[in-house]
Image (cartoon, rainbow, N blue to C red):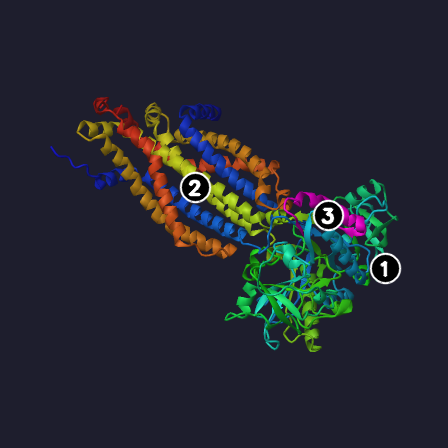
Amino acid sequence: MFVYYFQLGLRSLRRNPVLTTLMVMAIGFGVAAAMTTYAVFRATSNNPIPQKSSQLFTAQIDNRGPADNDHGEPPYAMTYIDATALMRAHKARRQTALYPLSLPVVPDDPALLLFRVPSYATYADTFPMFDIPFRYGGGWSATEDDARAAVVVISRDLNDKLFHGANSVGRQITLDGHSYRITGVMDSWHPQPLFFDPVNNDFGDPIELFIPFTRAIALQKRVNGDTSCSGALHEGWDGLLNSECNWIAYWAELPSKADADAYRQFLQGYAAEQQRAGRFHWAPNVRLRNVVQWLDYLKVVPPESKLSLVVSLGFLLICLVNTVGLLLAKFMRRAAEIGVRRALGAPRQTIYLQFLIEAGTVGLAGGVLGLLLTGVGVLSIGLVFDPDIARLATLDLSLVALTLLVAVLATVLAAFYPTWRAAQVQPAWQLKSN
Amino acid sequence: MQRTPSIQIRPILAALRRHKAGTILIALQIALTLAIVCNALFIIEQRITRMSRPTGLIESDLLTVQSNWVGVDADTTTPLARADLLALRQLPGVQDATLTNSYPIRGGAWTTDVRIDPNAKSGMATVTQYFTDDHALPSMGLKLLAGRNFRSDEIGSASRDSYTPPPVAIISAALNGKLYPDGSALGKQIYLGMKPSTVIGIVERLQGGETDTDSDTYADYTVLLPIQLTNYANSYLIRARPGQLANITRTVPQLLYKLNRMRLIPEKRGLRTFDAVRTQAYRRDRGMAILMSAICVILLAITAAGIVGLTSFWVGQRRKQIGVRRALGATRADILSYFLTENLLISVGGVLLGAVLAIALNLWLGQLFELARLSLSYVLVGVVVLLLLGQGAVLAPALRASRVSPVEATRSV
């Protein structure tokens, strides 16, 4: 029966070509708009480290006070004073202070130009903490952190570029005039958005270099990102380290809720201590946010993405209202046919079934058109969003399935009222009036 | 015999009551379309306004090059930069060149608080600071409204960690208006830190370095300072002689690498003409405007198609009644105006609901995305557009209806 009704549905598509075309186009455009913007939204609201996002926390400490902070919220980043104090306290299972820096790579071959790759200064804990995969070797050790060692972890791409993919562990590379020993080569690793520093790099190229935080500080490497200062102006590099300038991100791995609660207590205690020491003239104001909360708080999903999703869902709604009207017209035209079928003994259920399947057929056709248009839409996301974001939105298998599903479901949903009307047709009246 | 071709509203309403579902669907579609189109048009207008803000620069024939020294002690970069500038200014096709820590709509800026009373607790405005030299005005193409340019002997150099505000500064007219609303700031003092700077010049306009919406409130508050920063990723702004931009875009990096190989010109945004800077700065705004325009056009087309479809169905359903009316003496114009009026009545209902929805949607979007309040003129324009669209869409089926022959009345009754 289902197959028969489906065939009837296909035949009916051809019967009113204009109405059918209108419906298929409305559904196609509506679904394509919604799916294209959803693809962007899905990419930008992605959880970049799902297996650990509830165990990784970033800490914030208010060193500004109510007069200077952002509506009661502590600054995004930490001062050097606070970040290093928390590192020394070592209260979490793993922890790292980190900041982005510019570390130009000087190729050994003088014919080649210098180039720069996205780089971070971190502690040894970073690698196990963020589940960074390695192709060769591994991260450096805490001992090397303490020794401010000139060691480096590089990406697979950089290794391909500099060493043609060979195992380069133990070899030296020159970064900004200084030599570093490679301890590990990462495997492909590209969390998007970059959860541990969305303030400076939300979407973009993968991180290709890590050097010890302690080494970067010893070399007086400035942050290649946001620095936000308050209070007295500082003088020189030591001035910066002792200033109230915020520029360092701080992350801790806290496996259980008890650990997180204990760490929050510890942060409170630390801020209270700073207050007692006279550095803070306000009550402790600290935050501990996990990855998802942090990305939410920073509104990493571009407002354009949400706005276009909302508008295109409205667009889909209008297309569906349109479809309800057109289906009504299409079905009611066949009142006579329905009358005959009912008179010959067809119960209402079969009418329901036939017309819902017919609507599903229209929906499927709309879905196929929608799929093509979604493909075009995904390809042209670069016209609307930053290339870094456009690159993330792809038409994968799940989106294909979702497009077809939404098209069919939405059309069947839109068909409920027209179908109900069709099933209400009185056979006697229809037969008499013809 | 005199006939008054009057438009009968009551019979139309009676007929609509028999087509409740279709009537409500068309009205609803018009209402939703109006709500979305109004807001989309509003978003388009806002984005275009942002995109068309002038920087104050003469943007044609302008090249930007970011160059970072690599493996060079910060104390020694000043002579290196001076050598670069001298060579750049002598390069064929180059009219002038300057060094600056940032430039308008570059994305990212060094901002600070400004005050005119050193003892004031909080600043009067956030300003973007441009650390540059005496070639900034001619290279950027800024228009000096009052006062003078920097002199070459006023140009200093400093590390960004140990810089103190210089004794002289040039400010934008917008900042002048903010700090001294009643007159000229020329010769007066401003505080960008603890030490005062005397305003020696006022430029007509100079935009800040950021383009995100958060910076809109202080976008035009800018100050030029005669300091070359040493440990900073500075940029050269190079003004080409007319028609030479493409040439120098090729020769400038060659020259710079020849002067000193230990430098980094970032691959992504290191070398850009100002046209490219503008395109990249407003990519999201332009994209949003394109997307919203596309949605508007498709939406209006789909709504029109929906009206055509449903009205055609009604005409088909009522052929007999139309035939009877025609047989009883109704003219073609009567039938035409019947359907036009019917559509008008439905549309008016739709746009009334739609106007309310448009404002509600705007308020809701405003809460989510800090969208400004929708001006009523957009709703009015939207209402007119949708009423015209409805009439236009109904015209073809209505004309078909008017051509129904009176003979139809006699068929198969």
Above or below — where is B82 with respect to B380?
below
Q: Residues within 10 Å of mark 1 (few under 14, many from 20)?
A: few
- Residue at mark 1: chain: A
Name the residue that disc number 2 marks.
A318
Kindly report the distance in space between the C-alpha atoms of the residues bearing marks 1 and 3.
Answer: 46 Å
Name the residue that disc number 3 marks.
B252
Q: Is residue B266 left or right of residue B129?
A: right
Quadrant of the frame with the N terminus of chain B = top left
Which residues make up the magenta segment? B238-265
Secondary structure, mark 1, is: helix
Q: Are marks 2 and 3 on the same chain?
A: no
Count of numbered labels shown in the rendering: 3
Secondary structure, mark 3, is: helix
Kindly report the distance in space between the C-alpha atoms of the residues bearing marks 2 and 1.
Answer: 63 Å
Q: In the image shown, does A311 or A358 lie closer to the viewer?
A: A311
Quadrant of the frame with the C terminus of chain B = top left
Secondary structure, mark 2, is: helix
Q: In the image shown, does A108 or B393 lie closer to the viewer?
A: A108
Name the residue that disc number 1 marks.
A143
Q: Is residue A102 visible?
A: no
Above or below — where is A282 with respect to B57?
below
Residue B85: percent from left, percent from top = 74, 55
Residue A44: percent from left, percent from top = 61, 48
Amino acid identity at mark 2:
Ile
Amino acid identity at mark 1:
Thr
Above or below — where is B169 with respect to B140?
below
